[in-house]
Amino acid sequence: MLADLSPAAPPHTAEPGRDILHEVFGYEHFRGPQQAIISHVIGGGDALVLMPTGGGKSLCYQIPAIARQRAGHGTTVVISPLIALMHDQVGALHEAGVSAAFLNSTLTSEEATAVEKRMLRGELTLLYAAPERVTTPRFLAQLDSMQERGKLSLFAIDEVHCVSQWGHDFRPEYRALTVLHERYASVPRIALTATADAVTREDIVERLQLEQARTFVSSFDRPNIRYTIVEKKDASQQLLRFIGNEHAGDAGIVYCQSRKRVEEVAQMLCDEGMDALPYHAGLDSKVRQANQDKFLRHEGIVMVATIAFGMGIDKPDVRFVAHLDMPKNLEGYYQETGRAGRDGLAANAWMAYGLQDVVNQRRMIDESPAGEVFKQGLRGKLDALLGLAEATDCRRVRLLAYFGEASAPCGNCDNCLHPPAVWDGTDAARKLLSTIYRVQQASGISFGAGHIMDIVRGKQTEKVTQFGHERLSTFGIGAAFSEQQLRGVLRQLIAISAVSVDGQAFNTLQLTDASRAVLKGEVPVSLRESVSSPKARPAKAAKGSSAKAGAKAPLELDAQGEQRYLALKAWRAEVAREHNLPAYVIFHDATLATIAQRAPQSRDDLQGISGIGAKKLEAYGDEVLRVVAGVD
Ligand code: ADP
Ligand code: ZN
């Protein structure tokens, strides 16, 4: 869905850029608002594009760059902060037969000079450059000379939220990009980001003087991602089951909160025979870089990471993102899960969440040195995330609503697929709250969750005897509830701030202003029935057979097709190694699977398969046919 926020746009009859979409990229249709954006920019208009990760932002400037170069306008300069990715992005363009290069600090000065010369001679359709490079006097002088000759076609400013302090990744050097508009007012600009919120958007427009730009806002929905949030019991085993049952051999990311936990989980997955690597800020930068490269270049690697990992990871075939610990807020959750399924194929976002997560996150906020107003903001954001975790209705509806988008139940989240049985926890909640109150009254001090639940359930523990809590009127009033049920109720009470956790005092529980409404029965507490999780396929099954042979194809294939698919992947790995590029830059999995399914006999049969453009047909057509013939 496209919401065009600017006044009347001229209707277009032809579809500018469609020929390039077919010929160069080998794709049949534009996705979402791509067509509207591309015709606007080809026509020389400015654009601000807000599109979720995986929405297909690159084509929005690459196709106009090619079209405008063909029309004699010269070179498009792409400004991107993601230096580590420029090499692969430019490599992907070369594979598609587009002339491109990059300028950043990884080049020697001789290499950089060679690129500059090619740019000045007008040989480049796209030039990628880091923001700090673009604003140097030397580079601006080169742009001046291109401009004078009418060979400066377009500026594409990627990750444009970096210009705003409200975005999650402020970079001061982005501020200096105003020079582009001031110095080259006639050169169109397209600015792109996956960060949606209104404050950041307004800030971008103001900072970069994009008032004249047409704004294109895509739906932020990622329909191919299935959201699942499970109650945390034994997180490691749950993760093993999830990967073993649904993702053997797939590439995925597992997010954990601490470095220590990252190391442990990565080790555990390796012990189970998976290819898992750790990534966190405490690792040596060389190790970190090597692990990231492996994740991008090899297949089926599971990256276990803190949130230090992920910015600008544009690997399209990440099949799952798992959270073993809860992120801080919905923005983080959405961004991290968004790294799954950029290729549009089915992907899973899975999170295990428990009482301890709620306690930890609340405590971290309470203990932070920030001011009270700021903390209140953080609590509000955490509450929204807890609301999602506790939800018994469609997760996607809640997620999109948070980002200001209305939607209907999605049919592709755990709650839609298996509507949870719900029980009314109001009674249990009141019993817990009155116990917290009475204990405090009787003893003058507060206690933690375990002790409170023991009293409610009437358990005669040492601590109960020590404090004489068996004499409380609430002792044993909730004997009918299981500990798990009470734990769930308590989690939700903390989530809705009807109970607070004192991190300074052994995580003891206290009543809050919001407790009264629950005690009076004004706020219903409804909880999902805890279902015992399905029996696991032994995690070891992932070892050897399926894990090492690689993930299953994204299409239904018969035995012969599977053979072709595997042979094609082996061939692709070889080519990718030779070209020093990630495999997906050569062909996506979906493209290989389609080839495997159709068993083409001739170049004509290859034509029209999504992802095979003219250059790739020319370069790889015969080899692909040979690989297919070798299997049949
Ligand atoms: P973003 O930068 O918005 O996260 P990308 O530009 O990396 O997304 O695109 C995500 C993936 O979708 C890429 O692999 C790209 O080749 C593919 N893609 C983009 N547009 C189309 C399209 N119209 N048809 C098919 N695939 C597309
Ligand atoms: Zn749903």
Image (tube, grey):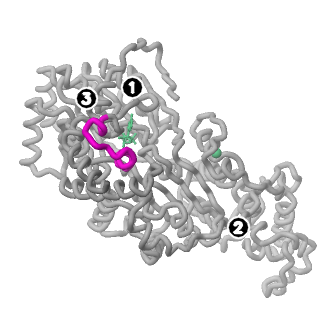
Ligand 1, image quadrant it occupies: top left
* Horizontal relation, residue 444 to residue 277: left or right: right
Q: Are marks 1 and 3 in contact (CB under 8 Å)?
A: no
| Nearest the eye: 625 or 98 | 625
**Image coordinates for residue 539, horizontal then vertical, percent:** 52, 73
Q: Is residue 240 above or below residue 230?
A: below
Q: Alpha-carbon distance for marks 2 and 3?
A: 54 Å
Which residue position is annotated with label 3?
A: 65
Residue type (three-letter) at the residue carrying disc 2: Ser
**Image coordinates for residue 359, horizontal then vertical, percent:** 64, 65
Q: Nearer the viewer, mark 1 or mark 2?
A: 2
Residue type (three-letter) at the residue carrying disc 1: Ile
Which residue position is annotated with label 2?
A: 532
Q: Residues within 10 Å of mark 3 (few under 14, many from 20)?
A: many
Q: Alpha-carbon distance for marks 1 and 2?
A: 48 Å
Q: In this picture, which residue range is highlighted in magenta?
A: 589-607
Q: Nearer the viewer, mark 2 or mark 3?
A: 2
Residue type (three-letter) at the residue carrying disc 3: Ala
Residue 132 in sight in this render: no
**Image coordinates for residue 259, horizontal then vertical, percent:** 44, 69
Mark 3 element type: helix
**Image coordinates for residue 164, horizontal then vertical, percent:** 41, 39
**Sequence order check: which comes first, mark 2 or mark 3?**
3
Placement of the C terminus among the 4 image quadrants: bottom left
Q: Quadrant of residue 409?
A: top right
Which residue position is annotated with label 1?
A: 37
Residue at figure coordinates x 66%, y 74% from the top left? 506
Q: Is residue 423 above or below residue 448?
A: above
Q: Is residue 202 above or below residue 374?
A: above
Q: What numbered label is drawn on residue 478? A: none
Q: Residue furthest front?
A: 632
